[in-house]
Amino acid sequence: MKELIYVFLGGGTGSVLRYYVQELLHERIIPYSFPWATFTVNIFGSFLIGLFYALSARFNLSPEVRLLLTAGFCGGFTTFSTFSNDGLTLLKNGFYGTFIFYTLISITLGILAALAGGMVNGK
């Protein structure tokens, strides 16, 4: 039961931070022409999950803390569903090239970011 509380707390924190980043980027900084907010949180979240797993191995963090940071925080912060909806919106609006670019760059950089985050442990 306590594991669920850790995931809940991390997920809530990650979701609120994701919402704040999306509001900040799209409402105040960058007019919407590309899903920058979703792209940013997903790439940064991919880096963080790699980092958190590496740090949990390096410093022997408890399973509860690892759950809070990975399944909780990163799960709430990153968003595959919004990525999917943004892609669909690009397709519906006829931005096929942008859709292909967004999809490929998100997946490629997401994997590379997780790898980079995990390199803290030297593996």
Image: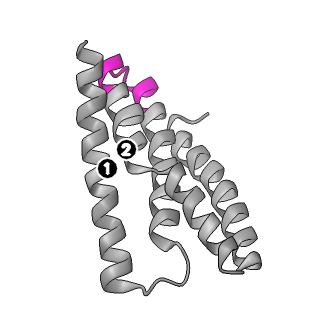
Element marked by disc 2: helix
User: Which three-letter amino acid code belongs to the residue tagged 1?
Assistant: Ser
Quadrant where the N terminus sits is top left
Horizontally, residue 54 falls left or right of residue 90, namely left
Q: Which residues are magenta?
A: 55-65
* Residue 71 x %, y %: 41, 32
Q: Is residue 91 magenta?
A: no
Please identify the dominant SS of the magenta region: helix
User: Which three-letter amino acid code belongs to the residue tagged 2?
Assistant: Gly
**19 or 119: nearer the viewer:** 19
* Residue 72 x %, y %: 35, 35
The residue sitting at 47% across, 41% down in the picture is 49
Q: Residue furthest top?
A: 1
How many residues crowd mark 1 within 10 Å: few (<14), some (14–19), many (20+)? some
Q: Residue furthest front?
A: 92
Going from N to C along the chain, the mark reached first, 2 or 1, is: 1
**57 or 16: nearer the viewer:** 16
